[in-house]
Image (tube, rainbow, N blue to C red):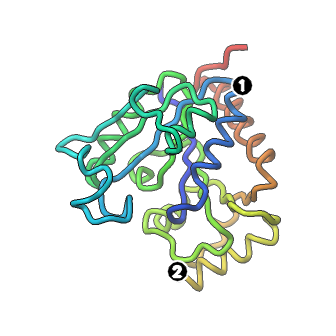
């Protein structure tokens, strides 16, 4: 059975994706066990260095790599270590080149046993359809990365989460204007109407919405029912 997948994507690096994922794990793990997948692509942009000195270059090969379990990927201060600290029951760290993402995601998802997984990343949306996808962004998104742009244009996101204080009502117009002025991206009314907007103070509302989605999926039999 395909696990229930929640995607945590970002308009760029350092937008607060890991923080939101950990916040969701902390809340949702009170109900049932959740796993997490961290996607790391091996190219110079993934660590700010050129390909020859990339911090994961030694892990890249002809096949993607998936490191599962605490002994394999729990490092203090790293994103995967933060997942463990937040309460995930397992973490799968997938390392791949750009053209290995599809194969690597299939391998990582095949290891999920809890029926529920949060995935941090954006490029995998080209190959995987999540049950719910959240795009994390500052209210002024600046230049957004191509995978986030593609996701917005295709209507792949269900929600925008502003990683800053304020009200979603006030921050949303800034975000939409930033898409237009900084990226030449104008969203049609239809994809905009399908998006929910949240900010940091709305975390409880976002968690409640995700919980309602889980209940709906359980009722339909598409994910395993939580043990009471």
Q: Find the residue positioned furthest to the bottom.
A: 181
3 shown above or below 126: above
Residue named by callout 2:
183
Please identify the residue farthest to the left as the structure is shown.
62
Quadrant position of residue 186: bottom right
Element assignment for label 1: loop
SS for tag 2? helix
Q: Residue 95 is drawn in which quadrant?
A: top left
Name the side, left or right, on which 64 lies relative to 208.
left
Q: Residues within 10 Å of mark 1 (few under 14, many from 20)?
A: few
Q: Which residue is drawn at 65% across and 75% down?
A: 140
Residue shown at 46%/43% (left/top)?
Answer: 38
Disc 1/disc 2 C-alpha distance (Å): 40 Å
Which numbered dot is residue 31? 1
Q: Where is residue 100 in the image (x, y as percent from the top left)?
A: 27, 47
In the foreground, 144 or 184 = 144
From the viewer's perspective, is residue 57 above or below residue 76? below
Residue 92 as seen in the image, left or right of residue 133: left
Q: Can the viewer see residue 135 in this picture? A: yes
**Image coordinates for residue 162, horizontal then vertical, percent:** 69, 62
> Badge 2: how crowded within 10 Å, few (<14), some, or many (20+)?
some
Q: Residue farthest to the front?
A: 76
Q: Residue 227 carries which label?
A: none
Whole-percent x, y for residue 149 in the image: 49, 68
Label whose residue precedes the other's in the sequence (1 or 2) = 1
Q: Quadrant of the C terminus?
A: top right
């Amino acid at each position: 059975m395909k696990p229930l997948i929640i995607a945590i994507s970002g308009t760029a690096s350092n937008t607060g994706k890991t923080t939101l994922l950990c916040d969701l794990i902390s809340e949702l793990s009170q109900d049932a066990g959740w796993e997490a997948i961290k996607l790391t692509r091996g190219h110079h942009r993934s660590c700010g260095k050129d390909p020859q000195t990339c911090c994961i270059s030694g892990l890249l090969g002809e096949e993607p790599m998936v490191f599962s379990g605490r002994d394999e990927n729990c490092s203090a201060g790293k994103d995967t270590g933060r997942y463990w600290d937040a309460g995930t029951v397992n973490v799968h760290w997938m390392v791949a080149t750009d053209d290995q993402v599809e194969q690597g995601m299939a391998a990582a998802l095949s290891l999920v046993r809890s029926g529920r997984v949060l995935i941090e990343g954006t490029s995998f949306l080209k190959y995987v359809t999540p049950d719910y996808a959240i795009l994390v962004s500052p209210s002024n998104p600046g230049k957004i990365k191509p995978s986030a742009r593609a996701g917005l244009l295709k209507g792949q996101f269900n929600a925008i989460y502003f990683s800053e204080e304020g009200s979603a009502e006030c921050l949303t117009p800034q975000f939409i204007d930033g898409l237009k002025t900084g990226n030449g991206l104008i969203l049609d009314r239809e994809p905009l109407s399908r998006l929910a907007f949240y900010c940091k103070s709305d975390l409880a509302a976002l968690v409640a919405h995700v919980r309602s989605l889980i209940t709906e999926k359980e009722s339909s039999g598409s994910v395993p029912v939580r043990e009471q």
